[in-house]
Image (tube, helix red, strand yellow):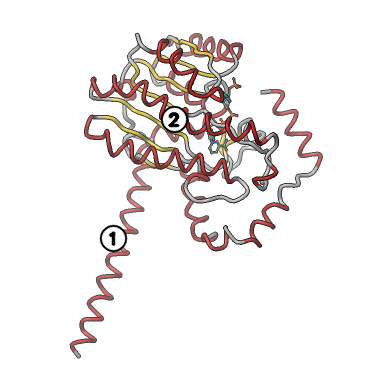
């Protein structure tokens, strides 16, 4: 009798615990993706300027434009001077904000940071968006299929990983002195769990996710927020402009929702659609299946897109 009572109590407490956890997750999702549409943090409170890396197209450009729309002056960092000038002009003309451009190639490694530091030193940086990132293959591929692997491995590590702590190191001291600041690190769904056939990319994004969690824990008491954003599919050059749908977000649509989540969560999928996809993936594709040889072989087969689709993507890429 005593044993059955104890077991029943343990059972009830366990169910209650899981119910509470479910309720808490639902509330967090509700506040992050619904309430945030109506009440947003005034991003100007962090400082006058926002720095965005990889700011001339896709998600980075969308962050630059959305931050300008929300009242910040923008420092754009990217590779192509011509594209930098075009985006800067667009921001100045449409949103009336000041801009500053810094030409830098993040694949060059540590040598570029003194120049960036010099360009930033006079400006009150309130927000840093560590967005720049590259992939090394246009489709799901085995690690040994990496084209020009000798160079690509270093490039992707310099661009996707090194840039994040290096850029953070440049702006963080001044944020700490002022007691406020926001660092947004763009990770990826592939940086949440291991993704075979995207192994190096996935690993670089895991780095971004973990670095963000740790940095936030270290500096939240100093008034700094470090937010990690982990999108699924966004229609950009990187994804060869997949058609926008409920699953694939446009860069502008994604960033507008993602910026609303600032102050609500330090880890986010960025938008409701991607958060739901993350839940579905967790339920339908557990680690044992995703990491199995059978699944990897099936996934590899899906990479062979038809020639017409390839042609369409080429044209979209050129238009951008
Ligand atoms: N698109 C997605 O579905 C998706 C999903 C999850 C995560 N992400 C992440 O989101 C971030 C942005 O991706 P995206 O899709 O917007 O990419 P994108 O459209 O290819 O844009 C990349 C941006 O980075 C710049 N860039 C590229 N290589 C650079 C380099 N070596 N040095 C300096 N700037 C460089 C490009 O500028 P230039 O043209 O001047 O080189 C461009 O402004 C990446 O970190 C990516 O991993 C994307």
**Residue drawn where x is 51% and y is 26% of the image:** 60
**Residue drawn where x is 75% and y is 28% of the image:** 315
**Residue drawn where x is 32% and y is 39% of the image:** 264
Depth order, front residue of 96/179:
179
Residue 204: image x %, image y %? 51, 39
The residue indicated by pointer 2 is 164
Mark 1 is surrounded, within 10 Å at the Cα level, by few (under 14), some (14 to 19) or many (20 or more) other residues, namely: few
Q: Which mark is residue 9?
A: none
Q: Give the vertical position of 268 relative to 12 (above or below).
A: above
Task: Tell me if the residue at label 2 has its CB under 8 Å from ligand 1.
Answer: no
Residue 302: image x %, image y %? 71, 51
* Residue that extends furthest to the left in the rendered view of this protein: 2
Mark pair 2, 1: CA separation = 36 Å
Depth order, front residue of 208/285:
208
Quarter of the picture containing the C terminus is top right
The residue indicated by pointer 1 is 20
Mark 2 is surrounded, within 10 Å at the Cα level, by few (under 14), some (14 to 19) or many (20 or more) other residues, namely: many
Task: Tell me if the residue at label 1 has its CB under 8 Å from ligand 1.
Answer: no
């Amino acid at each position: 009798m005593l044993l059955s009572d104890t077991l029943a109590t343990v059972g009830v407490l366990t169910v209650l615990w899981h119910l509470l956890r479910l309720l808490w997750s639902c509330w967090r999702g509700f506040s992050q993706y619904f309430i945030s549409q109506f009440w947003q943090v005034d991003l100007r409170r962090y400082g006058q300027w926002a720095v965005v890396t990889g700011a001339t197209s896709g998600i980075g450009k969308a962050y630059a434009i959305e931050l300008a729309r929300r009242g910040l002056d923008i420092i754009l960092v990217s590779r192509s001077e011509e594209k930098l000038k075009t985006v800067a002009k667009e921001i100045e003309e449409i949103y009336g904000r000041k801009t500053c451009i810094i030409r830098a190639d993040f694949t060059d490694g540590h040598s570029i940071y003194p120049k960036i530091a010099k360009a930033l030193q006079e400006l009150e940086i309130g927000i840093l968006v560590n967005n720049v990132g590259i992939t090394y293959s246009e489709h799901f591929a085995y690690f040994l299929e990496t084209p020009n692997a000798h160079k690509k491995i270093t490039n992707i590590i310099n661009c996707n990983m090194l840039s994040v702590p290096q850029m953070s190191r440049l702006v963080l001291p001044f944020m700490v002195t002022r007691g406020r600041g926001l660092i947004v690190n763009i990770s990826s769904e592939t940086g949440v769990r291991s993704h075979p056939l995207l192994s190096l990319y996935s690993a670089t994004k895991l780095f971004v996710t973990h670095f963000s969690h740790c940095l936030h824990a270290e500096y939240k008491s100093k008034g700094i927020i470090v937010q990690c954003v982990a999108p699924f599919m966004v229609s950009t050059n990187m994804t060869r402009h997949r058609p926008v749908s409920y699953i694939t977000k446009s860069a502008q649509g994604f960033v507008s929702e993602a910026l609303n989540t600032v102050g609500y969560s330090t880890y986010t999928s960025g938008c409701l659609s991607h958060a739901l996809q993350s839940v579905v993936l967790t339920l339908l594709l557990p680690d044992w299946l995703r990491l199995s040889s059978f699944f990897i072989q099936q996934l590899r087969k899906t990479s062979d897109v038809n020639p017409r689709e390839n042609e369409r993507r080429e044209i979209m890429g050129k238009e951008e």
